[in-house]
Structures are given as C-alpha cells and as structure tokens.
Amino acid sequence: MTSYQLKIQTIYCGDNIKMLKDLPDESVDLCYIDPPFNSNRNYEVFWGDVQEKRAFNDRFGDAKAYIDYMRPRVNEIYRVLKKTGSFYYHCDWHASHYVKIMLDEIFGANYFRNEIIWKRTAAKGLAFRSLPNNHDSIFYYTKDEKFTFNRKYLPHREEYIDKFYKQVDENGRRYQLTDLTNPNRDRPNLTYEFLGVKRVWRWTKERMEKAFQDGQIVQLKPGSVPRFKRYLDEQEGTPLDNIWTDIQPVQSQAKERLGFPTQKPVSLLERILEISSNKGDVVLDAFCGCGTTLVAAQKLNRKWIGVDISPTACRVMGQRLYELYKLREGKDFWVDDLPKTEADLRELPHFEFQNWAVIALGQLTNMSGIPNKIKSGDFGIDGKLYPVELEKKKKEDKDLFGDIDKYYPVQVKQMDKVGRPDIDSFQTAIRRDGRIKGYFVSFDFTKDAIAEIRRLDKEGEIEIVPITVSSLLRAEQYKE
Ligand SMILES: C[S@@+](CC[C@H](N)C(=O)[O-])C[C@H]1O[C@@H](n2cnc3c(N)ncnc32)[C@H](O)[C@@H]1O
C-alpha cells in the first residue's frame, strides 16, 4: 500500500515508472495514455521521426519488449485508479493485439468496455500490396462494475434527417410520425380502443389521452391508426458508438498544431473526458507529450496530472497552458523535476539537450525559441529565435516552423568548451542562411573562441552571441 499526497495541476518530468510510484493508491478518476511504440527510443518518438520500415520478425521482438516495458507501468496505473475509475490506452496496429491481452490480464477481461476505432481521415499513402492502415485503437477498461459513464450523442446526419424527418409543422419544426403499437402482443392491460382503433398500445390509456391533448398524437383520418409526433429538436441525436470518424487528426494548418507529429486533437481527449469523468475529477496522462489531455482537462474543469520523460515536452506543455489559459508555472500549475543543474543537463540525450537550450534561450531573450524538428540535415543550425512572441504569431496564423522571414539561428553544443573551429563553422552556417546574427549555447567557450567572436564582430559582418548553460540556468532560477 503506497500512500503519498496527491499533487494536482502538476507536470512531472521523468520516467513515469518512478513518478507513478509516488502517486497514492486509488486517487485518479480517469487515466489516458498514448505511449510511443518503440519504447527504447522514447526521446525520439516525441519528435515523431521514427519510420516503420522493419520486417515482421523485428516487430515481433519489439512488441514483446514493448509489452515488457509497458506492463509495470500499467500495473502502477491500475493501482492509482480509483475503484470507479476508467482507463484508455491509445495505440495502433503495431502492438494493439498484444496490448489487449496485457490489459485483459491486468484489468480482467470482464472489465474491457470497448475498443474504440479512431479513423484518421487521410490514409498515410498507398501501402505496397496491402490496404493502408487508417485507424488507431483506443482500449477502454474500467476498474470495477460501478464507474462514471456519461453517454454521448452525435447530431443526426443530414441524409438521416431528410429521410426520416420529412414533415414540418406550422412552427417550422421538423418531425416524423412513429408507431405507437406495442411489439409485444401479449399485454392485456395495454390492449384497448383509442380514437376508435383497438390495438396493443405502448402506453397506458391515461398517458395516450394526455399526449393526444398535448397535440403529440395525430390521427390522419378517422379510423386510421394514431401515431406519435416525434420532433427532431427533442431528440438527443445518434448515440455515439465505438467507431469515431468525426474527429480530424491535427492537420498541418490546424490552429492547435504545435508541430509534433504525435500530437492528438483536443476534441478527441475532450470526448474521452466527457464520457468517463465529471467536473472536479482527477485526470492523469502518464505519457502526455505536448499536453493535449491536460488542455482538455483544464477546458472541462477537471483536475489534472501529466508525466513526460522529455524535458522539451514538459516545457512545451507549460507554454501551451500559458498561451491557452494564461496559467502560470509556479502559481497555477507546477513542473516538477525538470533538469535544474549542469550535471542534469550533461545527462540528457543530445537532442533533448538541444531542445532544452533553444527553448531556454527563447525565455532568456524574450523571443520564441523554436528547436529544429529534425535531428540531422540542419547544416549547423539547431533552432531559431523569432523576435516576435509566439502568441502573436499564432494569432496571425503563421506556421511557427516555417521559414518566416525574421529569425536568429541558434547553435547548441553539449560540450565543455566550444573552440574556434566551432565558431567558424557556425559563422558559415549563419551566412549560408542569409543572416547576420546568431546565438551559440554551450557549457563554456575557449579563449580562442571568444577572440574569434570579437574579431567577427569587429569586422561588422556577423555577430555571434555566446551563451553559457550556467547563464541559462541562472536566468531560469531568477524567473522562478
Ligand atoms: C505519442 S507521445 C504522446 C502525445 C500526446 N498524446 C499528445 O497529444 O501530445 C508519447 C510521449 O510519451 C513520452 N514518454 C515515453 N516514454 C516515457 C516514460 N517512460 N515516461 C514518461 N513519458 C514517456 C514521450 O516523451 C512522448 O512525449
């Protein structure tokens, strides 16, 4: 039995196996996860650049490793879920069948509620000699028989309305006439004459008479079978089933898009939260990427907890919550365990370090630090600083990762001392990019490197601003 205090409105930066262990038993109402398939390359998968091109044997090996990796984490999630809690596991064809078996073992097959098929609208290219895979699977389990479940309805489709709601009354309301007779012929207490017609009716005579007085029952001509006027605007819609085709993936032009290919649409998470939680409930996402679940939870007045192993993801989330809801880190929400010392930063995978540095530099300079999405082919430029605020650009609907015309290139080196040759090659990269100023981040710079920077500056052609990791860390501490 673990019992710690539950800290809500918190993003934990770290491996969720450790973070989950710190959460109290039975403290979460709803957990959604969308883990990367290739678990050995977690850091990379946030950036979505893993191509699936391997043979089946490899995949089978991966699937086993993946399940071995996920099982202890899902066990922890099971422990922290309340008895009335629900769990949603988002995956796709790579591992869905293995995942289902694991979840049946952990939750019990009887507590499997649905496999939700989320159809992505556009298939990813034509597969060679097979059909394109075009859906994700979301497995839905509950911990027990008593659980939160709010049924959802979708608006009727136009064709359905045209086909079934043909009549329009004097007030312009659409309706259809529906049968009032009882399919069960053996109901003596419901067998009587109404408006001169003897039938087995659905309702009691009193209810029928009341509905008739209220104008809800019509008889088109004397002797014809009375029918019920079902108004379209009184219907809730079509009950939502497990095939979801009406939610678009985050398109390249979408306003909510942050540029991470694994980002899920907020409307998908809103739907899940509405079905399986109520206002004030605690929602957990233990693989929360750019924080889509947290955004949906905030929007729907749920409490939330997010976990991600990538410091970049944790920062992106913080930024997103500020931009959307003006939530301030340290006041309205907390980010725990971000790398805080030089030693922490030395430990980060190189790509994560680059991202950390570019984003932190943005904060230091009051610009928008946008790391490169791809890891290679950047010709010495690891990110860009835009001198306009992220928010403003978003309002103008500009693609943050596109080549908008004013930015400063950033180079990041996770090394003790940057030397003169590094400065020279950055200078070439800046020129090639058609810029005149750039920022260089590292742990330190040699005297030669600094002299070279001064010389370039004096020549008046290229300005390189050297930034040490310790100054970025100090600026962060000061900010807090
Ligand atoms: C597919 S993405 C999630 C995307 C998210 N649903 C969204 O809409 O932004 C998976 C995330 O899991 C994170 N991750 C991978 N392994 C992890 C672990 N062991 N603990 C915590 N987070 C992890 C990755 O950094 C990545 O951001």
Image (cartoon, grey):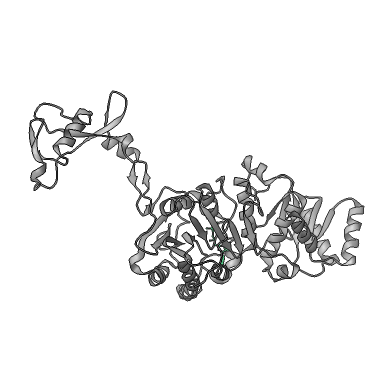
Residue name at image x 33 percent, y 45 percent: 238
Q: Residue furthest top?
A: 170
Number of on-image labels: 0
Q: Nearer the viewer, residue 92 or 6?
A: 6
Residue name at image x 47 percent, y 56 percent: 125
Q: Is residue 245 above or below residue 37?
A: above
Residue 151: x %, y % from top left: 36, 50
Q: Nearer the viewer, residue 392 or 103?
A: 103
One can see residue 123 in this view: yes
Residue 65: x %, y % from top left: 50, 75
Q: Is residue 215 above or below residue 157?
A: above
Q: Nearer the viewer, residue 36 or 58?
A: 36
Is 351 on the left or on the right of 160, as rendered? right
Is 412 on the left or on the right of 285, as rendered? right
One can see residue 262 in this view: no
Is 140 on the left or on the right of 45, as rendered? left
Residue 259: x %, y % from top left: 60, 53
Is 118 on the left or on the right of 215, as rendered? right
Corner quadrant of residue 207: top left
Residue name at image x 51 percent, y 73 percent: 69
Q: Image quadrant for the C terminus?
A: bottom right
Q: Taking the image as four quarters, which one is ligand 1 found in?
A: bottom right
Q: Nearer the viewer, residue 17 or 365?
A: 17
Residue name at image x 27 percent, y 32 percent: 175
Residue 120: x %, y % from top left: 45, 53
